[in-house]
Amino acid sequence: MSEERGEGMGGGRVAADELRLLIERAERLEEEKKGISDDIKDVMAEAKSRGYDTKAIRKILAIRKKKKDEYQEEEMILETYLQALGMI
């Protein structure tokens, strides 16, 4: 049973079927990612239509991804810099 093979970028042998499957898997994931991204845009459009500030919502989402100490440390540094610049 011979498998279609060619030289890979690193000079090694590449199994065409295996490579094709990996690429197809990545393509499916890209499609799913685009679908999820579209869903998020829909949620943001709904929030905006109800009067919410979507920039604030996106900021809250970013904060909620972080650990509490990490966020608090960033806020302390930001406050220190703002004070040094006379902005607060």
Image (spheres, rainbow, N blue to C red):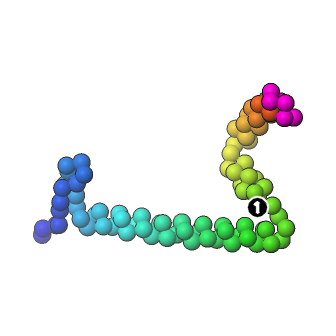
Residue in the image at 70% along x and 38% along y: 70
Query: Is 76 within the magenta?
Result: no
The crowding category of the residue bearing disc 1, from other C-alpha atoms within 10 Å (few below 14, some 14 to 19, many at least 20), is some
In the rendered structure, the answer to whether residue 55 lies left or right of residue 13 reads: right
Q: At which x and y percent is residue 15?
A: 22, 61
Instruction: From this view, report whether residue 58 is shown above or below residue 84.
Output: below
Q: Residue placed farthest to the right in the image?
A: 88
At 83% from the left edge and 71% from the top edge, which residue is drawn?
Answer: 50
Q: Left of 74 or right of it: where is 31?
A: left
Q: Residue furthest left?
A: 1
Q: Which residue is mark 1?
A: 54
Which one is in front, 73 or 58? 58
The magenta stretch is: 83-88
Which residue is farthest top? 84
Quarter of the image where one finds residue 5: bottom left
Is residue 6 shown above or below 76? below
- The residue drawn where x is 80% and y is 30% is 85
Q: Residue at x 72, y 48 (%)?
A: 63
